Image (tube, helix red, strand yellow):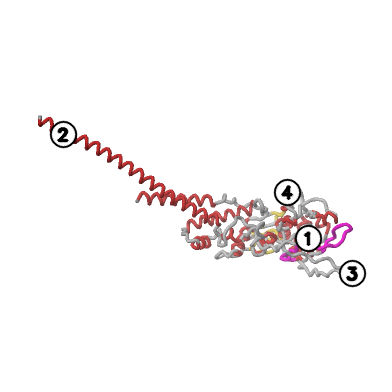
Amino acid sequence: MRKISRCFALTIGLALCTLTVLASDEDAPASKSPSAVTPTSGESWIHHLHRSFGDTSMGKTGRLGPPPPASGEDAAGWQMGLLPASSPENITLHGADLYRLNCQGCHGEAGLGAPPEIHSVIDPVRATSVPLILARMKKSGMDMSSGAAAELARQSQNALLQRLHSGGEEMPSFSQLNDAEVRALIAYLNQLAGVPGAKQLTVTETPARVGELIVKSTCHTCHDATGPNPSSQELEDGTIPPLETLTTRVDQMELIRKVTNGAPITMGTPPTLHRGRMPVFFYLSKSEAADVYLYLTSYPPSQSVAPGETIAGVQQNADGTAAGGGAAAAVSTPPPLPAPAPPVQTAQALTPTTSDGIPDWVVTFLLVALGGAVATVIAGGMGFAAYELTRLGRQGEYHNVVSTGVEKAKRRHRNLVAQ
């Protein structure tokens, strides 16, 4: 029984070790994201995925701009309002701001995504919390040590960072974020997911950096960096204007209006006003939209970024926080194609998981591993018992043969003595 108990403990230990290895992704490399402002380059993300604007929820908010005025009516007025007379050199952003500027266009305000295309970020973030992992395992009727939970949380954290830095098949990488921005963003994601003890962090950014973050994370989802300026008919046919032509199509006030409030656009032949297909980024402020225009005019998009075409966009403060580019929502001329997308409420999921933060496949694998361990112990015990019975049987036969030989020898000896 002692041997069997040791075998069972060893088997369970091996099963748990296997679970730990399979549950982990490769450790995410240390973030070396550029902290300098650089031009946007390359094709849009939906073009990279070979999707049309109407076939995706990416970069959408579920809100469209106002329709064109009816014949004989004047267009509804829009008050620009006053922008700050002089924007501060640096802007303090909280983690919630970084989420809003980089993630909300696809994942929505609550981080729930737009299933099935865009997964929730809430469950993968909860999987990085030891208390939530332990609570999930307890709810499932399974015991787990704090050490094992800490290892699973570490692996989930690495997977989250890996996805953020390198992207995935359906999600672009956010390599433009520097280390301080990533830390602030993840701290807010923990708060959004209800991780115990989560607190927001801040970074300090320049207006150009804010514009860069919005353009690269939100606008570039649908707009190519470069390309020809589309005609009215091409716009009606579904062509999305490239980023490099936006500042020639509209001035700063018109871009701010388009981004934050929406505006009709001229399309078709003959050119007539239509409701724009581009969603309204209502969660971006007018000053942030102005930062988009500043960034696009200061760092015109290019096919490729030449080495040297950068300026310091994020500086390091004395207290260790980052200073650099800030936040502004960039969407310009309306992206073509039909139908408003349903409101997006969440962030791209790293891996499908349960609501309490432990992936379903982890629980399933653990149960299968434990079942396999029990089956192995039972099979091993039965084999050991069969072996012992066979061995003892052979020893019994041997003793019988020996006993028979001894008896025969005694009889012969008695016969000889009697003679």
Q: Residue 256 carries which label?
A: none
Secondary structure of the residue carrying numbered label 3: loop
**Amino acid type of the residue that numbered disc 4 sits on in the rendered structure:** Gly
Rendered residue at 57%/51% (across/down)? 25
Does 378 appear above or below 211? Answer: above
Looking at the rendering, the stretch of residues picked out in magenta corresponds to 264-285
Of labels 2 and 1, earlier in sequence is 1
Cα gap from disc 2 to disc 1, whole angstroms: 113 Å
- On residue 72, the disc is 3
Above or below for 193 versus 384: below
Q: Which amino acid does label 2 sit on?
A: Arg
Tag 3 or tag 2, which sits nearer the N-term?
A: 3
For disc 1, the marked residue is: 277
Name the residue carrying label 4.
Answer: 308
Dot 2 or dot 4: first in sequence order is 4
The x and y percentages for residue 253 are: 81, 64
- Whether residue 175 sits left or right of residue 363 in the image: it is right
Residue 298 can be seen, yes or no = yes
**Mark whose residue sits in front, 2 or 3:** 2
Q: Disc 2 designates what residue?
A: 411
Contact? badges 1 and 4 (CB < 8 Å)? no
**Tag 3: Cα neighbours inside 10 Å, few (<14), some, or many (≥20)?**
few
Q: How far apart are marks 3 and 4 (CA)?
A: 53 Å
